[in-house]
Amino acid sequence: MTKRIAVIALISYMAFILEFLLYHFWGAWGSPSLLMLVVIFFNLYLGIRYSITAALFCGFFKDVSGVAPFGTYILIYVMAAYLTTLARQYVYEPGSRFSRVVVTFLVVAGCFILQAFLSNMSHDIVWRDLFLHVLLPQLTITMVVATYVFIQLRNISNFFALK
């Protein structure tokens, strides 16, 4: 169990660094939500307990580096873990790439809406611009890389014999 948590922490940190570098190199159109994919993967691969662990690590890394109030991203990623569990019950079919993509789409879109509502508390938001300039690029690039990232995360998990 300790080995799993250490590997989850390491994977979460590496995903955070890679997401940070991609965003600063290519901007919104080149930055998939890798941290969200890590949370979704561990939910589908190991279950909700390890997904929440990944969510806490991912949220902590994002909160420490951001300007949002501390705990905002922890809340968002824990919500992603629970949304993944809900989608896993009703949509996910083990072994189906299409169902993994559908689960990813639902979770990323749901967490984006949650993040928009949390941001709306302190800022006036133009919803149309938010969807066109933030959600569309983030969702598009995340959907494009999701299958590849899940395969690589599975390979890493198999290497460390997490299952």
Image (cartoon, grey):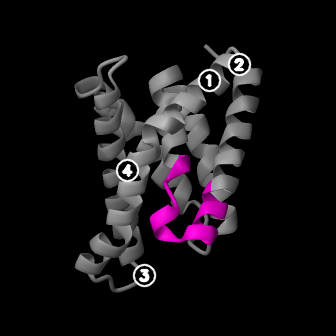
| Residue to which mark 3 is pinned | 122
**Upstream in sequence: badge 3 or badge 4:** 4
Q: Count neighbours of disc 4 (C-alpha within 10 A) and say few if under 14, some if 14 to 19, many if 20 or more.
A: many
Label drawn at residue 155: 1
What residue is at 30 percent from the left and 25 percent from the top? 92
**Front in this rendered view, residue 111 or 151:** 151
On the image, the x and y values in percent for residue 19 come to: 60, 57
Mark 2 and mark 1 residues within 8 Å of each other at the beta carbon: yes
- Amino acid type, label 3: Ser
Is residue 27 inside the magenta stretch? yes
- Can you see residue 80? yes
Label drawn at residue 6: none
- Amino acid type, label 2: Phe
Separation of disc 4 and disc 1 at Cα?
23 Å
On the image, the x and y values in percent for residue 107 come to: 35, 45
Q: Which residues are magenta?
A: 19-35
| Residue to which mark 4 is pinned | 108
Separation of disc 3 and disc 4 at Cα?
22 Å
**Front in this rendered view, residue 157 or 80:** 157
Separation of disc 3 and disc 2 at Cα?
44 Å
Foreground disc of the pair 3, 1: 1
What residue is at 31 percent from the left and 32 percent from the top? 86
| Residue to which mark 2 is pinned | 159
Query: In terms of image quadrants, where is residue 114?
Result: bottom left
Judged left or right of residue 159, residue 117 is: left
**Upstream in sequence: badge 3 or badge 2:** 3
On the image, the x and y values in percent for residue 96 come to: 32, 21
Q: Disc 3 on helix, strand or loop?
A: loop
- Amino acid type, label 1: Asn
Mark 3 and mark 2 residues within 8 Å of each other at the beta carbon: no
Q: Count neighbours of disc 3 (C-alpha within 10 A) and say few if under 14, some if 14 to 19, many if 20 or more.
A: few
Q: Count neighbours of disc 2 (C-alpha within 10 A) and say few if under 14, some if 14 to 19, many if 20 or more.
A: few
